[in-house]
Amino acid sequence: MAPAAAQLADRLGLRFRDLRLLSQALVHSSYTNERPEAGEPNERLEFLGDAVLALIVSESLWQRHPGEDEGSLTTRRAAIVSTVALAGIAERLGLGSYLLLGQGARQAGERTRQSVLAGTFEAVTGAIYLEFGLEETRRWLHSVAAPELDESRTLSSLKPAKGVLQEISYARSGKAPRYQLIAQAGPDHARHYEVEVMIGGQALGRGTGRNRREAETAAAIEALARLEEEP
């Protein structure tokens, strides 16, 4: 584990005194399920990193958008800390290539799954916070997430995908979209859900996520992209 963590630390431009936390951030639960001797997976660090990200992103948005109210800032934060956005940052950093996965998870393509990448980024953030503290973590996050933090999209474009799709569905059929659970897999602590969304009996999109809400959001995003292609 240490060589991968050392390589990642170099890539991130961070000098860890102790690489054990960063090593742990790269251990997926599927790996420890197959190799209990590998120690603790990255889920606790993921939990911590989620909170650290929420704090730093909230602070940054509060400073960058002084004229916006709580609801607007919440919408912007949700877009930045979403599974899709965090997975995009993780992909830019190449985190998937350092992640330790069990054999079954590797074969299932978990290394490129958005929910796994997002969780890994959160875990790495948690490890950086514990090693360097809040100020250094803030500096690092502002650097790696600069495109997301600097983006000045209108609030209408950041409106939650499920809300936009619901408006379209009522306009088309007079009813709300119907989200149907297609599949769920994985142990209780690391479930993956697949959901299909339908409008007026027509299947328009599918999505996956760490919970049903994330999967429904991903399905709504795919449905909106499909609707945009229609004449």
Image (cartoon, rainbow, N blue to C red):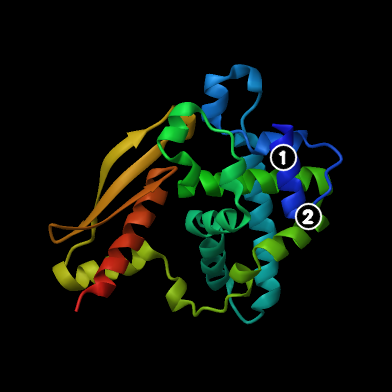
| Quarter location, residue 2 | top right
Quick one: 4 or 201, which is closer to the camera?
4
Q: Which mark is residue 143?
A: none
Task: Identify the residue at horizontal 65%, vertical 70% (top origin).
Answer: 61
Q: Quarter of the image containing the N terminus? A: top right
Task: List x then y, in percent, for residue 6.
Answer: 76, 41
**Mark 2 to mark 1 CA distance (whole Å):** 12 Å
Q: Which residue is mark 2?
A: 13
| Quarter location, residue 39 | top right
Task: Identify the residue at horizontal 75%, vertical 47% (top origin).
Answer: 9
* Residue placed furthest toward the right: 17
Task: Identify the residue at horizontal 67%, vertical 76% (top origin).
Answer: 64
Task: Identify the residue at horizontal 71%, vertical 46% (top origin).
Answer: 8
Quick one: 203 or 73, which is closer to the camera?
203
Q: Amino acid at mark 1?
A: Ala
Q: Which residue is mark 1?
A: 5
